[in-house]
Image (tube, rainbow, N blue to C red):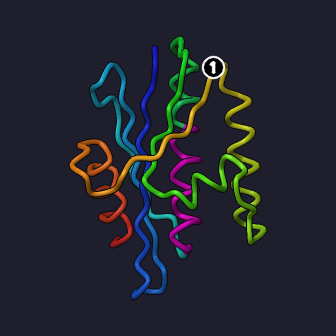
């Protein structure tokens, strides 16, 4: 089975950088689970990376009970994806710690993990849903 996991974040720069994340887990082209949470005061890139990490943690939980052959993390934030795949360097210890946790999750998953960019606000149903969930949780 393949998992497509859409992740997004929302950071309220006008309100002390309060941030929320949204994760939409899809199996067989359908929604299996959604997750949203308030993650505190973070930059938008930090929050996006936190969303990616949460998506991988969801995949780990699913893999504990089912055979997963591929995990696709689909995100609309190129700076976060560049950090995750090593095309840019972390500018803070907090980001570096999250990147190390992402690396550990990828190792724990007994399948291929791919990271994919999707254009934001382009009528992608699952990306739009992750965006809405993140926005709602940033406002908590």
Vertical placement of residue 131 versus 26, above or below: below
Relative horizontal placement of residue 83, taking residue 125 as reference (left or right)? right
**In the rendered view of the protein, which quadrant contains the C terminus?**
bottom left
Magenta stretch: includes residue 50: yes
Does 128 sit left or right of 58 as displayed?
A: left
Task: Judge by depth and name the residue closer to the eye, 96 or 60.
Answer: 96
Kindly identify which residue carries mark 1: 111
**Highlighted magenta segment, given as a residue range:** 42-57
Of 87 and 50, the residue lying toward us: 87
- The residue located at (27%, 57%) in the rendering is 121
Q: Secondary structure at mark 1?
A: loop
Residue 83 locus on image (x, y percent): 66, 56
Q: Is residue 28 left or right of residue 76?
A: left
Residue 88: percent from the left, percent from the top?
71, 59
Who's the residue at 56% across and 73% down the image? 42
Most common SS among magenta residues: helix
* Residue 8, x across and y down, in percent: 42, 55
Q: Is residue 29 above or below residue 100?
A: above
Determine whether 15 is above or below 137 in the image: below
Number of on-image labels: 1
Q: Residues within 10 Å of mark 1 (few under 14, many from 20)?
A: some
Give the residue drawn at x 72%, y 66%.
94
Residue 24 x %, y % = 37, 41
């Amino acid at each position: 089975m393949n998992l497509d996991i859409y992740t997004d974040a929302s950071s309220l720069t006008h309100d002390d950088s309060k941030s929320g994340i949204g994760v939409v887990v899809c199996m067989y082209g359908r929604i299996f689970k959604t997750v949203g949470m308030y993650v505190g005061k973070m930059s938008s890139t930090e929050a996006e990376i936190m969303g990616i990490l949460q998506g991988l943690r969801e995949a780990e939980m699913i893999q504990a009970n089912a055979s997963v052959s591929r995990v696709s993390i689909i995100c609309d934030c190129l700076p976060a994806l560049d950090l995750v795949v090593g095309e840019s360097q972390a500018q803070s210890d907090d980001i570096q710690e999250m990147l190390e946790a992402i690396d550990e999750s990828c190792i724990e998953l007994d399948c291929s993990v791919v990271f994919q960019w999707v254009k934001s606000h382009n009528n992608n149903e699952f990306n739009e849903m992750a965006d809405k969930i993140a926005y709602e949780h940033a406002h908590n």
